[in-house]
Image (tube, grey):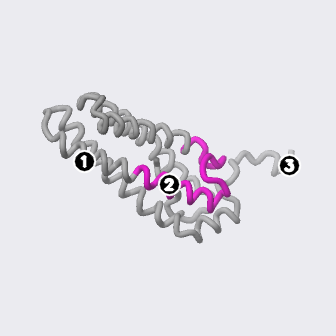
Amino acid sequence: MSAAASDTRPRPLYTPSQRARRDATVWTLVQGILAPLQFLVFAVSLVLVLRYLMTGEGYTAATASILLKTALLYTIMVTGAIWEKVVFGQYLFAPAFFWEDVVSFAVIALHTLYLYGLLTDSIAPLQLMLITLAAYATYAVNATQFLLKLRRARLDTGVPATPERGQPA
């Protein structure tokens, strides 16, 4: 058996041309800024939501934090789609990020359900907060997916990688 046939390493996340496009585009920096910002807002919001659920206090603060988290989510999804187009030639569901995009859409769906319930007053506050917890749990899965991709990209080159398409949705 040849060395090439016995090589079980996964294919690199990026081709050399994709890596060059990733490193050259401003959208990589945008994602690298938005992703940790969204995570920070998520962490604060999670505390506010849990506080409301445990005490019944702070609904307005929790709601404001959820709205900010949702705005950042939509922003990172749009800019992430642009990043994906620049790097991979398609706006979403590039093979390298297919499952991250699938989970991102679940995160967006849950945040959008929250917005719908809030704006139409058709979902009670307690249920809105429970929807938020489901959205945040799904977001945590998505953020983990992206961190694993960032690690994989770094391991592919043996050099620290810049944050890519950080968003989790």
> Which residue is under mark 3?
2
* Residue at the image point whose x is 57% and y is 65% from the top: 159
**Residue type of the residue flagged with mark 1:** Ala
Q: CA distance from mark 3 to mark 2?
A: 45 Å
> Which residue is under mark 2?
78
| 158 in relation to 24, above or below | above
Q: CA distance from mark 1 to mark 3?
A: 60 Å
Query: In the image, is 74 to the left or to the right of 157?
Result: left
Query: In the image, is 138 to the left or to the right of 155?
Result: left
State whether the magenta stretch is mostly helix, strand or loop.
helix
Q: Which quarter shows the N terminus?
A: top right
| 64 in relation to 153, above or below | above
Q: Earlier in the sequence, mark 3 or mark 2?
A: 3
Is the Cβ of the residue at disc 2 closer than 8 Å to that at disc 1? no
* Residue at the image point whose x is 42% and y is 42% from the top: 139
Magenta-colored span: 73-100
Disc number placed over residue 64 in the picture, else none: 1
How many tags in the picture? Answer: 3
Closest to the observer, 2 or 10: 10
What x and y, as percent, mark residue 13?
Answer: 64, 54
The residue most toward the right is 1
